[in-house]
Amino acid sequence: LIIYKSYHRMNTEKVAKAMAEATNATLAKVDQTRPEDLATYDLVGFGSGIYGGRHHRELFALVGQMPSIEKPVFVFSTSGSGKDGYHRPLKEALTAKGCRIVGEFQCKGEVRFLKFIRTNRGHPDEKDLQDARTFARGLITA
């Protein structure tokens, strides 16, 4: 299962779809996911854009509501900077629920400030999406 929150530029949705297509995973928006259903999957991914240095608050709300489960999980994100370190708060929340982090993926996403300033135009691009597919396939063959 790949759970995601994406809005505005839909960067994270593109990555989530690429991962799901590569692995034949079920894809679900965070607001369409019931916490009690997570236990029925062998592997669960959690992803969103990065907002103020963290994953989206709706993803944290879902994790807070889910039962403790000993399950392998992965996290992913898109951000304006593409830097490491943004996943730590979500990984800590998942670990506190008994989950085992088996991987993480991040890439740049296009960001628009005001109406005229854009960074990372075109990201995630095809290379980013291919990297996401490769990452996801690696999780299910490991």
Image (cartoon, helix red, strand yellow):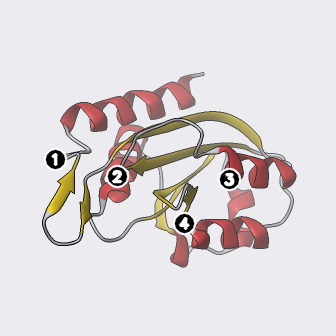
Q: Are marks 1 and 2 in contact (CB under 8 Å)?
A: no
For numbered disc 1, what is the local secondary structure? loop
Q: Are marks 3 and 2 in contact (CB under 8 Å)?
A: no
Residue 109 appears left or right of 1: left
Q: Are marks 3 and 1 in contact (CB under 8 Å)?
A: no
Extreme-left residue of the structure: 116
Q: Earlier in the sequence, mark 3 or mark 4?
A: 4
Q: Earlier in the sequence, mark 1 or mark 2?
A: 2
| Along the viewing direction, whichever of 40 and 130 lies nearer the viewer | 130
Q: What residue did someone put label 4 on?
A: 56
Q: What residue did someone put label 2 on?
A: 17
Distance CA(mark 3)–CA(mark 4): 10 Å
**Residue type, label 4:** His
Sort mark 4 into few (<14), some (14-19) or many (20+) by Cα contacts within 10 Å.
many
Sort mark 2 into few (<14), some (14-19) or many (20+) by Cα contacts within 10 Å.
many
Q: Earlier in the sequence, mark 3 or mark 1?
A: 3
Q: Earlier in the sequence, mark 1 or mark 4?
A: 4
For numbered disc 3, what is the local secondary structure? helix
Q: Give above or below for 58 relative to 68.
A: below
**Residue type, label 2:** Lys
Sort mark 1 into few (<14), some (14-19) or many (20+) by Cα contacts within 10 Å.
few
Distance CA(mark 1)–CA(mark 4): 22 Å
Residue 91 appears left or right of 87: right
Q: What residue did someone put label 1 on?
A: 122
Q: What residue did someone put label 3 on?
A: 90
**Residue type, label 3:** Leu
